[in-house]
């Protein structure tokens, strides 16, 4: 093998609790074989917050990410400020102390917009991350910790022949915010061989549908110089798009998302809890997944894979996984559940109006 060849794996949202190492059992061999591993750390970790014990969010619980060899964690997202400024500071400090790069957040906006540049086997990989879903409280300023962001606007066009009826909804990036993102990409393009942009974006808990701004921003990023686009936040897989020969993973779903805090406590009214989730999100989680109370279709997830040769991405694929009832991602091959994931991807891709085709290559699924 040429010493400039690399494998990069990218995964979706990560929320770890205490004693999380067993959650990596099935995916460990794949992570171990990768040269670069990227993931989205969904929540902050600090011991200074009063909910740290209840939520299991002490920084040392992130230790499995060190053992599994994660190279970069993205922090820009809607939960970044859940534990205040101290949560952002403590998360960053822990990652820095444990030699995991972070991107998309910082103690001010300049740090939050700073790219990560990794050098592996004579190849420089540049990564940028933006939060596109708000809230504004998470956004960094010149003197406030937070995340890098692209502001997205929503316009509701009323159906005047049907007062009170459902409006048409249009989403698009605020122009100046979009230009700033494009400028970041153009500047980074001068400094790296492979350029990755990750967006915290998408319609949460809504299968298949991709909002207009998601394609707008993904295309704009590629036009500005990006080679690979990643999407997190929706907590569901979304379709894959090929644009100008570049791959857009519109939604990577969860990787490991341990959130028993969202499940009813003993003695709570299960029916009332389920009805409230239906009211908010249109579904009731499966009670057999007490630490993973997401949409029933969120059991399908993936490891997104890029092969890099001589400073260029030469192919992209994904390793299909199904989350078990303990909340662990389990790698599934063609004869062990992978066909189920493949059929799901084909279905949601078609429903989203994308024309990407999927086919097997060994136990991985490639796009064309």
Image (spheres, helix red, strand yellow):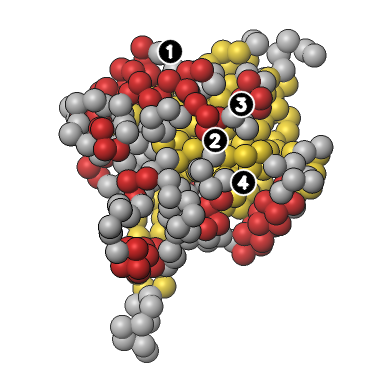
Q: How packed is label 2: few (under 14 Cα within 10 Å), some, or many (20 or more)?
A: many
Between discs 1 and 3, the one toward the N terminus: 3
Q: Viewer-nearest of labels 2 and 3?
A: 3
What residue does disc 3 label?
28
Which quadrant holds residue 204? Answer: bottom left
Between discs 2 and 4, the one toward the N terminus: 2
Q: How packed is label 1: few (under 14 Cα within 10 Å), some, or many (20 or more)?
A: few
Identify whether 138 is placed above or below 25: below
| Disc 3, SS | helix
In the image, what residue occupies the spot 67% across and 51% down? 341
**Residue 175 rendering spot, x and y as whole percentages:** 37, 48
What residue does disc 1 label?
99
| Camera-side residue of 128 and 23 | 23
What residue does disc 2 label?
11
What mark, if any, has residue 322 been given in the picture? 4
In the image, what residue occupies the spot 61% across and 26% down? 28
Location of the N terminus (image quadrant): top right
């Amino acid at each position: 093998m040429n010493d400039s060849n690399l494998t990069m794996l990218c995964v979706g949202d990560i929320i770890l609790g205490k004693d999380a190492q067993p959650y990596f059992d099935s995916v460990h061999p794949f992570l171990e074989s990768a040269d670069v591993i990227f993931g989205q750390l969904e929540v902050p970790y600090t011991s200074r917050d009063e909910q740290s014990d209840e939520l299991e969010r002490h920084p040392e619980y992130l230790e499995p990410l060190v053992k599994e060899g994660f190279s970069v964690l993205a922090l820009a997202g809607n939960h970044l400020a859940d534990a205040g400024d101290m949560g952002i500071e403590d998360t960053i400090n822990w990652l820095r102390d444990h030699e995991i790069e972070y991107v998309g957040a910082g103690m001010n906006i300049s740090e939050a917009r700073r790219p990560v540049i990794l050098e592996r086997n004579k190849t420089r990989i540049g990564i940028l991350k933006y939060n596109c879903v708000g809230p504004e409280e998470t956004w960094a300023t010149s003197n406030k910790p937070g995340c890098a962001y692209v502001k997205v606007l929503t316009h509701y066009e009323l159906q005047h022949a049907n007062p009170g009826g459902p409006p048409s909804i249009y989403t698009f990036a605020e122009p100046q915010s979009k230009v700033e993102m494009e400028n970041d990409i153009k500047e980074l393009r001068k400094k790296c061989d492979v350029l990755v942009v990750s967006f915290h974006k998408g319609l949460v808990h809504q299968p298949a549908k991709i909002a207009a701004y998601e394609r707008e921003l993904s295309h704009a990023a590629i036009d500005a110089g990006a080679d690979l686009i990643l999407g997190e936040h929706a907590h569901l897989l979304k379709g894959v798009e090929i644009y100008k020969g570049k791959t857009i993973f519109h939604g990577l779903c969860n990787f490991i998302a341990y959130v028993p805090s969202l499940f009813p406590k003993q003695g709570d009214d299960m029916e009332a809890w389920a009805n409230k989730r239906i009211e908010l999100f249109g579904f009731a989680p499966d009670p057999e997944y007490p630490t993973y109370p997401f949409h029933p279709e969120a059991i399908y997830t993936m490891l997104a894979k890029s092969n890099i040769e001589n400073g260029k991405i030469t192919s992209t694929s994904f390793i299909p996984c199904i989350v078990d009832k303990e909340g662990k991602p389990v790698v599934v091959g063609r004869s062990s559940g992978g066909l189920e994931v493949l059929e799901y991807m084909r279905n949601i891709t078609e429903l989203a109006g994308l024309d990407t085709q999927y086919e097997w290559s060994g136990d991985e699924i490639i796009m064309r």
